[in-house]
Image (spheres, rainbow, N blue to C red):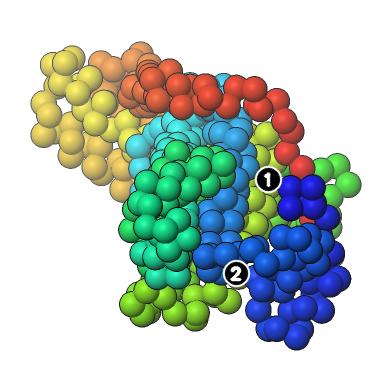
């Protein structure tokens, strides 16, 4: 049997399955054909789930091991970007309406934080995986107890040996015919959660591309539209959003499958699992490949960002102007009323005439504000409106991100391949 482990006649197995309509028994017969002396004992005491479920758990573990370094690389690339742009002020948005300023790097850290949670969850689920082991048809190990003539210790020893040979530290003590399908829920839940993080990030990038503040990579010969030559569509981010939606919906399959497993097992789980588990990992893999490509080539347009800030900053600075006037001996209520009137006039220019925000020019022209005219440039410095963003970024990267990435240092240099 050992000498024929890799001697698999897939053509014969396919023919056997046509006759038997049972995939595991097709391979049992095919293996027996290669090992005629062992044909009579192959699969003795076992059930199909001894083969299928244990194999699925190995595949789930190995698949998670493939995704973890890919996600770590995405986080690493974004961390570099956040550090580089830590001090670049940009207009913040709440409800997609202008809000207080933040920095480009701080906004990127919002994406990183979600992805770090996904990395931790993927690692947790991977480490929590347990082997089904040697449990028999309904999980009682009755067939193996009979095989070893009532010797409990031998049954437990066999279970432990098979578990260790498969590379697992623990096996389930309790199973039905299958490992609990709650495991599939756990695995696809973290993949669906990853999908949500990616969708949020890539939606932000698409909106920023519309504002012309940031773009994903756009190749020299790339065509954005067959009809409109000037178009620079964010197709990578759109692809990630499209795939992420599919990934998020796949969680419904294991939820429903687990809920309708009768007693020790029903077979209506099998076909569904063969689709949803594979699709979830293939989808997540493609998303991460594409996301790494995006994160390695993000382009920022500081002049566009600065112009948008200048359109909104005068209104944001009014509180600082009021405080400066009071410090210079002014009356808070009088100053508030003066600025209210000038702000409404400036807003009319912006909204009804399509002009630029001229509030500061109006303040400069009003003698009431002469005590602080010399301070206006300082009061309107965008960097004074970003709070502790740069310090938060530094602490976040040093305390939370870099330690999380340390186990993946040896795979950080791998470049992404864009999946077409």
Residue under label 2, please give it.
Answer: 274
Query: Residue 383, relative to residue 297: is it above or below?
Result: above
Q: Residue at x 33, y 77 (%)?
A: 263
Residue sticking out furthest to the front: 149
| Relative image position of residue 351 (x, y in whole percent) | 44, 55
SS for callout 1 = helix
- Where in the figure is residue 205, as x and y percent of width and height? 57, 47
Residue density around tag 1, few if under 14, some if 14–19, many if 20 or more, within 10 Å = many
For residue 241, the mark is: none
Image quarter of the C terminus: bottom right
Determine the residue positioned at 19% across, 23% down.
323
Could you tell me residue 368's position as x and y percent? 24, 25
Q: Is residue 95 left or right of residue 123?
A: left
Examine the image and state in which quarter residue 279 appears: bottom right
Q: Residue at x 31, y 48 (%)?
A: 344
* 88 sits to left or right of 1: left
Q: In this view, does 178 lie above or below 353?
A: below
The Cα atoms of the two marked residues, 2 and 1, are separated by 23 Å
**Residue 79: percent from the left, percent from the top?**
53, 27
Observer able to see residue 384? no
Marks 2 and 1: which is nearer the front?
2
């Amino acid at each position: 049997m050992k000498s024929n482990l890799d001697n698999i006649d897939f053509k014969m197995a396919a023919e056997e399955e046509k006759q038997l309509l049972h995939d595991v028994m097709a391979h049992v017969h095919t293996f027996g054909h290669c090992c005629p002396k062992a044909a009579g004992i192959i699969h003795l005491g076992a059930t199909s789930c001894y083969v299928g479920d244990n194999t699925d758990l190995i595949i789930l573990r190995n698949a998670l091991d493939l995704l973890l370094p890919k996600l770590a690389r995405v986080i690493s690339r974004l961390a570099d970007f956040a550090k580089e742009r830590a001090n670049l002020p940009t207009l913040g948005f709440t409800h997609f309406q202008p809000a207080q300023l933040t920095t480009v790097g701080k906004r990127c850290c919002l994406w990183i934080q979600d992805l770090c949670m996904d990395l931790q969850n993927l690692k947790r689920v991977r480490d929590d995986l347990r082997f089904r082991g040697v449990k028999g048809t309904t999980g009682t190990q009755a067939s193996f107890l009979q095989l070893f003539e009532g010797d409990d210790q031998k049954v437990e020893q066999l279970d432990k040996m098979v578990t260790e040979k498969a590379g697992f530290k623990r096996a389930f003590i309790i199973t039905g015919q299958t490992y609990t399908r709650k495991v599939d829920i756990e695995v696809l839940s973290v993949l669906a959660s990853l999908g949500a993080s990616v969708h949020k990030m890539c939606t932000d990038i698409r909106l920023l591309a519309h504002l012309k503040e940031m773009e994903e990579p756009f190749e020299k010969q790339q065509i954005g539209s067959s009809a409109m030559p000037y178009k620079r569509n964010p197709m990578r981010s759109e692809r990630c959003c499209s795939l992420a939606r599919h990934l998020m919906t796949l969680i419904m399959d294991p939820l429903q499958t687990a809920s309708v497993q009768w007693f020790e097992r029903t077979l209506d789980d099998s076909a569904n699992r063969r689709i949803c588990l594979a699709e979830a990992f293939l989808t997540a893999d493609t998303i991460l490949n594409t996301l790494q490509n995006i994160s390695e080539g993000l382009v920022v347009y500081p002049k566009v960002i600065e112009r948008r800030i200048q359109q909104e900053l005068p209104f944001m600075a009014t509180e600082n102007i009021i405080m400066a006037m009071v410090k210079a001996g002014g009356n808070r209520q009088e100053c508030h009323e003066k600025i209210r009137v000038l702000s409404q006039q400036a807003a009319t220019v912006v909204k009804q005439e399509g002009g630029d925000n001229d509030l500061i020019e109006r303040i400069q022209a009003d003698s009431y504000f002469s005590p602080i005219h010399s301070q206006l440039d300082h009061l309107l410095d965008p960097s004074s409106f970003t709070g502790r963003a740069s310090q938060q970024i530094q602490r976040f990267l040093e305390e939370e991100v870099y330690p999380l990435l340390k186990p993946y240092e040896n795979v950080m240099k791998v470049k992404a391949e864009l999946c077409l």
